[in-house]
Image: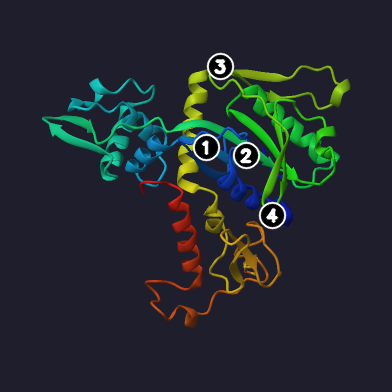
C-alpha cells in the first residue's frame, strides 16, 4: 500500500504524538503500574503501516528482554530462542519442525550463538544447543495510532478504509486516530464516517495534552482475523463483492511479536537514521524541555524525513573543521545528534 508523503505538519504532529504517548499512555485513569510503555513509529506489515505504535509491556519481562540485546530478533531467531531447551540437546530434537528447510535453522543457531544469546556445542557431527535465557513474554498489548492533524473529508475516507482493515484483521488490540484538538464542544472528527471501534484522541501538540473524544473497543487479537484484499471501488452503490482471506490466530501472534521486536529495536527517535544529521543546516531543537525534534535552519522549520536527504537542494555537508575535536573517531555534530537520540532511545528500554 503506498502512502502519500507526509506533510511537514503531519510529520511534526506525529513526533509530538509519539512523545505524548511515551509520557501519558494510557489516556484512561486506571493506569496499571506494572506496565511499561514503548513507542515506535512507521511500522506494521507489508500491507499496512501504522504511524505510531504503543507497546504496553510487562515491566519485569521487558527488562528480561534486554538480555537479548537492542537489535530485533527476526522470525528465524525467535523460533530458536523461544524453543531452546534449558539443558543440552540435539537441535533437531529440541526445536519443533520449522516448516522450512533445517539449514535455515542452523544458520539462525549460528547467528544466535554469535550474538551471545544461545549456547552451542558439537557432539560428534551433531550441533547441540542450550538456552542462555528463557525468552520472556514481554508484550501485553499493541496499540496503533494514526496521526491526522487536519482531517478533511477525503483524508477521512482514506482513513476509514484503513481503520476498517485494522478492525477486521484485529492485529492490534486497539486502533486510534489522533487529531489536532479544535477546542470545539464536539470534535469535528466525530462527524466523519469512521469505524466505531476506533478511538479518537484530540491532541494539542504545543502543550502536549490530550483528551479522549471517543474510546475504542478492544479488538479480538486471539481470534481469526479477516484480511481485506480488495474492496469495491464504486462507493456505496457498488454491489460487487470484496475479496478477503482469513488469518489464523497463530499467524497473527507471530506477526504481533515480529512488529514488537522491530518496535523494540527502532523506537520512534530513529527518524534521524533516514535524515541527514551530517548536513550543516540540521539541528535538534527541544520543545517541551525534553523532546528533541529535527529542525532545518535553511527552511526555518521541522523538516520531513523525505525532504531531508542527500537530494535536498539546500544540503551542505558539515565542514570538516566542525569535527576537529575527536574527529574522525568521535565525529561531528551530526554524529552527536545520533548519539543523543540513541541514548534517549536506550533509556526507554530498561536493562540495556
Ligand atoms: S538543508 Fe535539507 S538536508 Fe539539510 S537539514 Fe535542511 S532539509 Fe535536511
Secondary structure under badge 3?
Answer: loop
Residue 122 position by quadrant: top left
Q: Residue furthest right?
A: 237
User: Could you tell me which residue is drawn at 45 percent across and 35 percent down?
Assistant: 34
Mark number for residue 50? 2
| Residue assigned mark 4 | 207
Label 4 or label 1, whichever lies nearer to me, is: 4
Figure quarter occupied by ligand 1: bottom right
Tell me what residue is drawn at x 51 percent, y 65 percent. Answer: 337
Pointer 1 residue Cβ closer than 8 Å to ligand 1? no
Mark 2 or mark 1, which has the lower sequence index?
2
Question: Label 1: which residue?
Answer: 55
Q: CA distance from mark 3 to mark 1?
A: 20 Å
Give the alpha-carbon distance from disc 2 to disc 4, as whole Å: 24 Å
Q: CA gap, disc 2 to disc 1?
A: 13 Å
Q: CA distance from mark 3 to mark 2?
A: 21 Å
Residue 231 screen position, x and y as percent: 75, 24
Q: Out of 179 and 236, give the one closest to the viewer.
A: 179
Amino acid at each position: 500500500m503506498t502512502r502519500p508523503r507526509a506533510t511537514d505538519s503531519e510529520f511534526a504532529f506525529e513526533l509530538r504524538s509519539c512523545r505524548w504517548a511515551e509520557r501519558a499512555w494510557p489516556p484512561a485513569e486506571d493506569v496499571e503500574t506494572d506496565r511499561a510503555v514503548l513507542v515506535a513509529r512507521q511500522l506494521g506489515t507489508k500491507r499496512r503501516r501504522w504511524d505510531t505504535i504503543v507497546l504496553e509491556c510487562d515491566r519485569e519481562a521487558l527488562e528480561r528482554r534486554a538480555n537479548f540485546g537492542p537489535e530485533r530478533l527476526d522470525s528465524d531467531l525467535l523460533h530458536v530462542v523461544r524453543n531452546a531447551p534449558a539443558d543440552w540437546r540435539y537441535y533437531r530434537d529440541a526445536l519443533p519442525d520449522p516448516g522450512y528447510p533445517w539449514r535455515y535453522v542452523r544458520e539462525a543457531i549460528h547467528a544466535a550463538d554469535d550474538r551471545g544469546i544461545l549456547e552451542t556445542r558439537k557432539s560428534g557431527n551433531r550441533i547441540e544447543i542450550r538456552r542462555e535465557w528463557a525468552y520472556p513474554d514481554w508484550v501485553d498489548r499493541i496499540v496503533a495510532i494514526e496521526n491526522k492533524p487536519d482531517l478533511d473529508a477525503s483524508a477521512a475516507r482514506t482513513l476509514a478504509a484503513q481503520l476498517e482493515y485494522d478492525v477486521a484483521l484485529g492485529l492490534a488490540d486497539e486502533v486510534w486516530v489522533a487529531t489536532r484538538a479544535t477546542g470545539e464542544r464536539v470534535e469535528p472528527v466525530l462527524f466523519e464516517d469512521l469505524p466505531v471501534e476506533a478511538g479518537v484522541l484530540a491532541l494539542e501538540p504545543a502543550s502536549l495534552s490530550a483528551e479522549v473524544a471517543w474510546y475504542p473497543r478492544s479488538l479480538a487479537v486471539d481470534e481469526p482475523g479477516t484480511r481485506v484484499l480488495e474492496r469495491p471501488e464504486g462507493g456505496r452503490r457498488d454491489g460487487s463483492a470484496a475479496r478477503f482471506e482469513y488469518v489464523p490466530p497463530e499467524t497473527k501472534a507471530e506477526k504481533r511479536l515480529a512488529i514488537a521486536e522491530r518496535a523494540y529495536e527502532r523506537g520512534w527517535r530513529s527518524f534521524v537514521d533516514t535524515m541527514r544529521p551530517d548536513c550543516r543546516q540540521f539541528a535538534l531543537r527541544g520543545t517541551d524541555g525534553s523532546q528533541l525534534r529535527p529542525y532545518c535552519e535553511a527552511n526555518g522549520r521541522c523538516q520531513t524525513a523525505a525532504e531531508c536527504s542527500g537530494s535536498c537542494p539546500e544540503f551542505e555537508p558539515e565542514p570538516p573543521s566542525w569535527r576537529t575535536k575527536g574527529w574522525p573517531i568521535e565525529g561531528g555534530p551530526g554524529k552527536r545528534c545520533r548519539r543523543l537520540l540513541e541514548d534517549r532511545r536506550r533509556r526507554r528500554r530498561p536493562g540495556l
